[in-house]
DNA sequence: TATTGTGATATTGTATAACAAATAAAAAAT
DNA sequence: ATTTTTTATTTGTTATACAATATCACAATA
């Protein structure tokens, strides 16, 4: 009964995660609309060729992201989009498989522009000696990567991400740290329009780095804002109604 | 075997949610340390007096918040704190049951101070006519609540929350909207230090409101920053009737 | 001795079947 | 027409068996 699926997995751990991912894609892409009732558990079991145990765990996972909501006799209903938990790494991963990368990246950038400068501000205030030392190490690795010949995009991405993560850690604020993880997930899941290769970018990172080391919050914030200027993450298209429903965004 | 628990529930839907909440509390409070291996599923089943199915669904819920991580032969390990998903409504609810409200509120305020001003900025730019009309309605309800004699704290909290939510909706950005839900959950779960009763607060909200209606992003941002000045958020006010449970029953 | 392979073992992962609880919808009673 | 009762459908929960996986101990080998 489940011969087909039981063979072609083995890559990702957790069968229910795959099923959840599958259903999530269909919801995020609009194949299942908001308010719609999904097929019953038994039907889905047959569709995916898995046991009810696995399917239910999958549905529970979707529920925990605010995507669906199950009730006896009713079924499993897709929740309104405004209640979905977009601030979740796994959600970003799922979105990256169906949504327009450009639109999502821009919208996420709009959030970065709010949070990161403030994170730099707080980090400049609060970073411990140990955290400053760690930041120094990371920044030096960043310099190495920038001057590498030939330029290694992958190395740069890694160290860039680590630099930002270190700053979030230095805030000592669990909410900022969680956002750092989100940003991390964003880097992993999306085709990131890394703001140019190294050269000019390094200058900006140095500015942020120095500001934090000098315990100059205002400068740190200013440098971060400069770093996140929209034109540096430029993209050709405006952003159309890629996600289906209402779209009041765009700049 | 499960006599005790099967009786005292009925309030919250989902047995596995209660179990998850129980374990989450123990993790968040440090009763289970980072890196620690939890008891095996069977042991936990006996401890809570539930079936393995339910217990596993509970563990899956914790996993989806980044709290734990299960592997065969290893067991279920508590993940490092830095990987926990603090940007999640359910997490806030769990935290509210074990953590120091004052500390968490202040740390969350530090995030609000980053996001809300920018949200106001974007809302002033992007809000549709419909959204502006909605904001007007909400603000008028806010005025009514502020002038109510005697002052009704509960009414004020409701309308205050709705005002902010409307602004987040007006950004048209799913990430900001999700943060709005987080803020909403914060209001519900925590004893909020509501910024005074009505009078001075209404002025600030009016300032934000007018700025958005006038399509003046800079003013909107400035007003929001003023509104979130730290010293205004330090009087503890108990908030009655806050269960923190959402209900997606109808469309 | 150090390394490598091999199997025993404990734990989570998955499947199946049966029953309980909840509730929307239909039917019956007022 | 309104209220109450019944019915049917779907998720919620329990129980049991087996499969997959990774640790650990131990033996075989260079």
Image (tube, coloured by chain):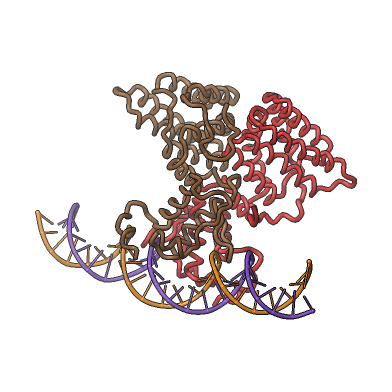
Chain colours: A brown, B red, C purple, D orange
Position in image of residue B19 (x %, y %):
56, 64
Q: Residue A205 at what x, y percent from top left?
A: 47, 24
Tell how many labels: 0
Q: Quadrant of the C terminus of chain A?
A: top right
Q: Residue furthest right?
A: B149
Q: Nearer the viewer, residue A61 or A171?
A: A61
Q: Is residue A80 left or right of residue A101?
A: right
State the residue at coordinates (74%, 41%).
B234
Quarter of the N terminus of chain A within the rendering: bottom left
In the depicted structure, whether residue A95 falls above or below residue C30: above
In the image, residue A191 above or below residue A79: above
Q: Taking B4 as reference, is B76 above or below it?
A: above
**Percent position of residue B229, x then y:** 71, 33
Residue visible at 34% across and 22% down in the picture: A147
Q: Is residue A128 visible?
A: no
Q: Is residue B124 visible?
A: yes
> Where residue A34 sits: x, y (%)?
57, 49
- Does residue B16 sit above or below A179 in this rendering? below
Q: Nearer the viewer, residue B159 or A188?
A: B159
Which residue is at a point 43% across and 22% down the rendered structure image?
A202
């Amino acid at each position: 009964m489940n011969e087909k699926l039981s063979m072609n997995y083995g890559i990702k751990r957790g069968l229910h995660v795959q099923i959840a991912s599958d259903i999530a894609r269909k919801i995020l892409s609009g194949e299942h609309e908001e308010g719609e009732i999904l097929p019953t558990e038994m039907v889905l079991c047959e569709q995916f060729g898995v046991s009810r145990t696995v399917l239910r765990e999958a549905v529970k996972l979707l529920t925990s992201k605010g995507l669906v909501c199950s009730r006896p006799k009713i079924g499993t209903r897709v929740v309104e989009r405004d209640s979905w938990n977009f601030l979740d790494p796994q959600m970003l991963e799922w979105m990256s498989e169906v949504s327009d990368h450009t639109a999502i990246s821009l919208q996420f950038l709009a959030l970065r522009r709010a949070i990161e400068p403030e994170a730099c501000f707080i980090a400049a205030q609060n970073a411990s000696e140990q955290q400053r030392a760690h930041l120094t190490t990371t920044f030096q690795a960043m310099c190495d990567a920038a001057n590498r010949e030939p330029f290694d995009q992958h190395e740069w991405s890694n160290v860039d991400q680590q630099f930002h993560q270190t700053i979030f850690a230095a805030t000592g604020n669990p909410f900022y740290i969680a956002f750092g993880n989100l940003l991390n997930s964003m880097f992993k899941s999306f085709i990131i329009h890394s703001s140019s290769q190294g050269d000019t970018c390094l200058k900006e990172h140095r500015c942020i780095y120095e500001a934090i080391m000098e315990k100059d919050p205002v400068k740190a914030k200013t440098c971060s804002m400069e770093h996140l200027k929209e034109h540096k993450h430029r993209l050709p298209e405006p952003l159309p109604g890629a996600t289906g429903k209402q779209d009041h965004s765009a700049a």
